[in-house]
Amino acid sequence: MAELLVWPALIAYGEAAVAYAGGLRGVGRFGRLGIWGVRVGWLAQTALLVAQAATSDGFPWGTWAGALNLLSWLVVTGYLAWGSNPRYRLLGLGVMPVAATLLVLAWAGGGTGVHASDGGGWTLDVHVGLMLAAFASFTVAAAVAGLYLFEERRLKRRDAGLLRLRLPSLEALDRLAARIALVGLALLSAGILVGLTRLRAADVDVAMTVTILIWALYVAALVLRREVGLRGRRLAWSLVAGFTLVAFVLPLTHFAS
Amino acid sequence: MKLALAGVSHHTASVELRERVAIDGASTSALARELARSSEGRHEAVVLSACNRTELYLASRDGDVAEAADRALLALAGADASALAPVAYRLADESAALHLFRVAAGLDSLVPGEGEILGQVRDAYETGAPGPLLDRTFRMALHAGRRARLETAIGESPASVPAAAAALAQQVFDRLEARRVVLVGAGRTSELTARNLRSRGATVTAVVNRTFDRAERLAASLGARALALEDVRDALADADVVVCSTSAAGFVLTAEALAPALRARRGRPVLFVDLAVPRDVDPALAAVDGCFVYDVDDLEAVVSASLEGRRAEAVAAERIVAAEADRFRAWQASLAVVPAIASLRALAEEIRSSELARVEARLPESEREVVETVTAQIVNKLLHLPTIRMKEAAVTPDGLVYADVVRHLFGLGEEGET
């Protein structure tokens, strides 16, 4: 029965994504509908994850579909940290379609079922957990960067309605995106270190190579921000590029390896 | 209870007439107290005098206050009383309260939702001579005003070009503390913009002007340094916001001339507010990464859109005011049944006490307190529901009938007649 919790979560996430699109028109009611959709969906998905954890002997999200389920939850959790602030609600327009898509893929791959599963050892569990938390951070950072690009475009175009649909300031978005990316980088570094303890030479594959590439990209972006002032639009595009690698390249290489 | 309002505002009277009846804070307080004193304490009075209105609120438990309010307003106009009389408005009871609620919410202001009026209403209330009715009415009005601003965005958007420029700066930089502002040109609008930015925490570092004396004067009042127009590039190196308002015929700031200064900023954004006509800032600067350029037309468009937004929010604010007016109506209606409730409770208590007195002597000391408590509880429980029902019925058209029926059934107020 607990498997059915995926449906209220999916419906609520979908409703939130649609409501946030309506929120672009600056009507407060849509934003409120959106955030309530996220909250309801998050509660349903949390209950699903708890049920999965309760019936599993080991780490229940070790499969690719299970990992997407947990990743989706982590992304929404990260969003909820800021999404309750009305000015940040529109962030949901970037985050919720991604979260809903991840959950649909998880469901299609059987990652939302509740059944006993064997663990793969605690180091693998920690490794997977850290990597997923890092990817969730990069997803939220990319959404914040997307909001920066949207707001910067409005300012550049001297949009007369700029102050009617109030978003966070450019400085606030720039700072927040960099901080979330830094958290993601710390988690990714820890995840890679834990993964190295299990690594054998024969295990090296495309997924690992791309993961190192992602790590290098975020290190470069954050170091350049600090040292030569890579900020604003250029930092935002770097974070979007990093997310593109995470979102598309890594899953593909996982299946290929 | 009677409530009356007599007043003039920008809706009804010209500025010349409004000037005649405008009074300062100390005088409003004195007038309110004088109005209360002259009625031997029977009247409550509050006087509200703001830029666009002068209003006298009078209330009394007995007697008509409308005429007194009207007379006092016309007396303020002195010789112009005859000119004022046709443009003054007179409202009573619920209409007067609803008007006050709208005023407090900024819905009756020239710019919907303007922030100062709520404070002015509060000052009038605190320095006036309110009694039970005006005290409650003004507290409800202040509550309605606060709700309108908290629950809608009616007061959020800027309503002037200087305020719009400052709001845009916040949209780029978030908090303006530690942000540096440079004025190029010392015009009136740029000064107002600078003061608006300063009020939000920004620091004006330099005033650059062709006429050095004028630059010095303005710089001194803003705590900045004065520079000649030739030194403008030095001033811009560390500026976050540049406000331009010179009368130069061509561009004062061009992309080529500012390129070294912008490179030195290492990606930090800069906002150019160009209030000059013809423009001072080369529009090509807008294409440079991190540069945001707004001319006076852009700012006026932002203000216009903001005012449109305020008007849209005013619809939601009107709903809040209407809800608060309903609460006021319910409270005022409940006053009508209060005497009946009080008489009923007094009668019950009288019966209880007299019956208790008859048997008290026969009761042992230890049981007297118990009987006292039990009988009091019985009376309270019996009267609780009728009290609630009468208060609920008070807001309906039959409210007073309920009170009359209770008086008739229990013979309230008949003792004196028999």
Image (cartoon, coloured by chain):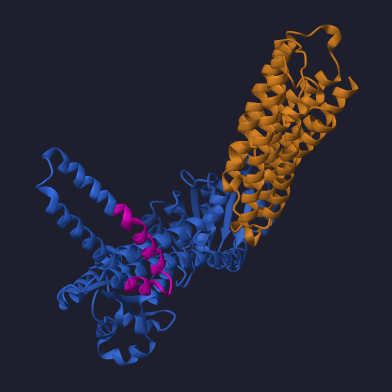
Chain colours: A orange, B blue
Instruction: Report the front residue among B203 and B95.
Output: B95
In which quadrant of the rendered image does the C terminus of chain B lie? bottom left
Q: Position of residue B402 (x, y in %)?
A: 37, 71
Residue drawn where x is 25% and y is 87% of the image:
B78
Seen as rendered, the residue at the extreme right is A256
Q: Within the image, what quadrant is residue A81 found in? A: top right
Instruction: Report the front residue among B356 and B168.
Output: B356
Q: Position of residue B242 (x, y in %)?
A: 54, 54
Instruction: Report the front residue among B136 and B372.
Output: B372
Residue drawn where x is 17% and y is 42% of the image:
B369
Q: Position of residue B236 (x, y in %)?
A: 54, 49
Q: With respect to residue B180, does A5 lie above or below? A: above
Within the magenta stretch, is there residue A156? no
Is B377 on the left or on the right of A73, as rendered? left
Q: Position of residue B39 (x, y in %)?
A: 17, 78
Residue drawn where x is 19% and y is 59% of the image:
B351
Residue drawn where x is 63% and y is 60% of the image:
A161
Can residue A133 be seen from the camera position used here?
no
Seen as rendered, the residue at the extreme left is B361
Q: Which residues are magenta?
A: B380-405
